[in-house]
Amino acid sequence: MQSDWSLDAQRLPCRIFLAGDSAAVTREASKAPMAGWGQVLHFFFTSEVEVVNCARAGASARTFSERGRLEWILQNLRPGDYLLTSFGINDAKPEEWLRTEAYGDFPQYLRKFVDGARACNAHPVLVSPPERDTHDVHGNMPRSITEYSMSMSDLAAECSVPYINLYDQSHGWWEELGPEGVRPFFIHLEPQEHPNYPDGFHDPGHMTPEGAIACARYVAYSLVEQGIIPPHWAINLDRTDFPPEWVTWLDEAAHAELTRSRTVGSN
């Protein structure tokens, strides 16, 4: 998919909206150092691009749509904007109100994001979520949501939508790093290591800033490499160090207000 880049100078900053779950969400300060890749995606773009991260922790493709969050995005999309959609982790959970079936209603819900963006003359992009730290006691790394990634890939081909396979990419990274090498990318905190978790906290499902930056870099790189966005919008793709102060978390009031306001109807 190619954009009409000749008009860039005449347009407002392009906006990249992000619909997703906790892997992509911008976290509140009380959750630090937990971070989502959407929280740091702006590191890789110039001022010509604004990232509007609408991802919500605990969301599936189903609940994001049913709770009016997709509708809010569609009401705010301008022609030429982008909508990155990344679900699958919570869709695989057993709770009936949350779950979708990989080859049942999951692609049906994803179509709402694709069709809605296109109706707004915006650009839909499907992004499979990153793999968790699934290493077992033997050091093997099983795949947790392969069928959802495959279903998203199939839908992208069917609808001629760009697809960024963050799932396979991240699984390859974590597998190569091994159980110990991958620890800095996920929340593994010992007692007294961080004030938010005085008793320690081990959460192989959520990332640190290091993990979030790795995933955000790959998403930004893929947007350029696939010709989805013009290359001059991207920066820092080869940067190896980011100042810790660049990673910021929302204060509790701002997080609560964004959660409340970025919805249409009941949330």
Image (spheres, rainbow, N blue to C red):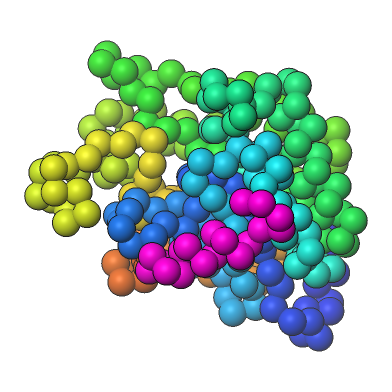
Q: Quadrant of residue 160?
A: top right
The picture places residue 166, in percent across and down from the top left corner, at 56, 40
Q: Quadrant of residue 263?
A: bottom right
Residue at 46% from the left image edge and 70% from the top image edge:
254
Residue 167 showing in the rendered view: no
Q: Does residue 6 sit above or below 152 in this rendering?
A: below
Extreme residue in the top direction: 138
Extreme residue in the left direction: 192
Residue 248 showing in the rendered view: yes
Residue at 64% from the left image edge and 73% from the top image edge:
49
Front-most of residues 97 and 18: 97
The picture places residue 190, in percent across and down from the top left corner, at 13, 42
Q: Does residue 91 sit above or below 208 in this rendering?
A: above
Q: Does residue 68 sit above or below 180 in this rendering?
A: below
Per the image, is 265 magenta?
Answer: yes
Q: From the viewer's perspective, is 78 left or right of 129?
A: right
Magenta residues span: 250-267
Residue at 33% from the left image edge and 44% from the top image edge:
185
Per the image, is 189 magenta?
Answer: no
The picture places residue 50, in percent across and down from the top left corner, at 62, 72
Q: Does residue 153 sit above or below 30 in this rendering?
A: above
Total number of numbered discs in the rendering: 0
